[in-house]
Image (cartoon, helix red, strand yellow):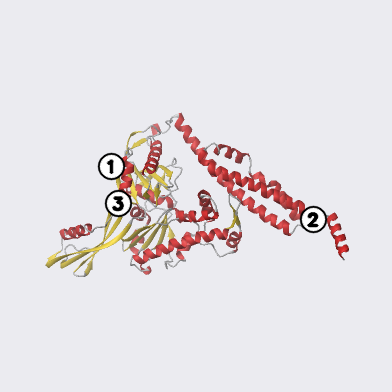
Amino acid sequence: MAENKENIIVALELGTSRISGIAGKKVNGNMQILAYAEEQTTNCIKRGIVYNIDQTTQCIKNVIEKLQQTLGKTISQVYVGLGGQSVRSIRSKVATDLLTQAYITTSHIDELRRKSYDIPYPNCERLATIVQGYTVDGIATEEPVGVMGTKIEGEYLNIIARHQLRSNIETCFNNTNVSIADTRLSAYELAENVLTDQDKRAGSVLIDLGAGTTTVVIYTNNILRHLVTLPIGMANITQDLTALNVEPAEAEQIKLKYGNAHPDDNDESAELMAQTYTTSFGQTHKVAEIQQVIEARLTEIIKNVENQIQKSDYGYKEFIGGIVLTGGGSNMKNIEKVFADSKLKIEKVRIARTLNQPVIKNSTVTNLSIDSGMAASIISLLMSGEENCVGERFNGKDMFRAAEADEKIGEKQQREQEEAKAEAEAVERLETYKNAIRDKITELEHTLKDVKENGKDGKLRKRASEKADDAESIQDDDYKKTIELLEQKDKYKQTVKEAKELGERLAKSADNLKEAVEKAKKDNSPWRKFLNTLGDLADD
């Protein structure tokens, strides 16, 4: 049957840090991503589980609305990923005694599966069941149908989660005009699109480093053997860094700027570790101190992964395919090195930069990097979809029909999009300015120390004076315009406040340096030297 060119799939993922939505369609065997949208979450989703129904519902509505505006079509249903800290696997074994020699039939296999399904898991529901293998009269066999025997035993891997995981999501969608086409086990779909057939056959450990959770998926001999979502993630590092007396937003920026999972043992790295960072409140911390906080939490995450590998009952030697890292945390510098050098005893480690299936990003999709580990999970959900998820036209731009490609959206909608884009660019610019100001403050403080210790060096005083005079030039007209734009919006109040406080700190550092230079000049002037000589003679 010919491929339906208008068969558009939509998928949603409910994560700890964001709710994201994606739309796409398959074109000549490639997945073409047509739209992407996200909403930041703070308290409504905790470690992948819906905590606040009302806030989550509103976020879902906002994501759907954004996708519809981009697609130019009304979304009627979506595929939803299931994940979160309660998702885990449990093995079960069930057997059927045939009492006499008989051929194993498909009916016997079905009976084993029913027995496995009848095993109760209090307060939990079964999300999936994966066959691990069969034995007939104690002899392992991959295909038992047609084998003669008196007793058959089946081993299964049951993926379970708390009832609230699915029910809370369904409650949210009942409050929208969009239905759930189907739910997918996010970790399984991710593994299917990140691990190659060779990875699964040779034995591999997939580690999805998310914000609030870390998911471990283990394959050997092409079979899923173990799956668990741990209630610890990269957001814990951000939380740890707030102990430096900074707001979470700044702590996240510190993690992104200085985060290094495995600092290299060289002079450049040592020099960086010796540098200091000045917070928006004017406190200074050595980069080495920041690194210690990051390393401590990463060590805990790796230790938890190690425990799960041990629980899987598969030895390290069975993972010839090695460790495959994905998720937002896989973007941290040298993250693969810290896993390779850990007690996991698996030296082969790689980061999944791309998916197994070809992915094409439409030029209008601006917020999604298809080469980032952060996007792998939601793209995998999109690829698992089958049914068309869109209906009639929406009040927006239809990007699929060439004749309508230049159709203008409403003036208000266009203005809002332009304003949102300008604000996003301004926030990015301001963060760049703030980092530059912090670096300048650190430079001035180092220079101040040098002047106090070597004030008689005239060339040093001259350079110091020039640095002090030039310090505030970093706050140019573009900086001032950026501040003016953002301070009109309440949601940017904190980031503008931080920028202004850093500016005040910069001005103070420049003034302190100027005073030190003037004092050094006086202390080392000819007249001062003459007076000092007279004083020394008088003492003699």
Q: Which residue is denoted by mark 1 in the rendering?
A: 2
Q: Is residue 413 above or below residue 40?
A: above
Q: How many neighbours does mark 3 have within 10 angstroms: few (below 14), some (14-19), or many (20 or more)?
A: some
- C-alpha distance separating marks 2 and 3: 76 Å
Q: Secondary structure at mark 2?
A: helix
Corner quadrant of residue 413: top left
Residue 4 percent across, percent down from the top left: 30, 40
Q: How many neighbours does mark 2 have within 10 angstroms: few (below 14), some (14-19), or many (20 or more)?
A: some
Corner quadrant of residue 201: bottom left
Q: Is residue 157 above or below residue 439?
A: below
Corner quadrant of residue 476: top right
At a point 31% along the width and 45% down the height, the residue shown is 170
Q: Which residue is denoted by mark 2 in the rendering?
A: 523
Q: Is residue 429 visible?
A: no
At a point 50% along the width and 40% down the height, the residue shown is 491
Closer to the camera, 101 or 195? 101
Residue kind at label 2, given as amino acid type: Asp
Judged by depth in the image, the label closer to the viewer, 1 or 3, is 3
- In this view, which residue lies farthest toward the top? 411
Q: Is residue 473 above or below residue 244?
A: above
Q: Which residue is denoted by mark 3 in the rendering?
A: 163
- In this view, which residue lies farthest toward the left? 100
Residue kind at label 1, given as amino acid type: Ala
Image side of residue 449 versus residue 101, left or right: right
- C-alpha distance separating marks 2 and 1: 89 Å
Give whichever of discs 1 and 3 has the lower sequence position.
1
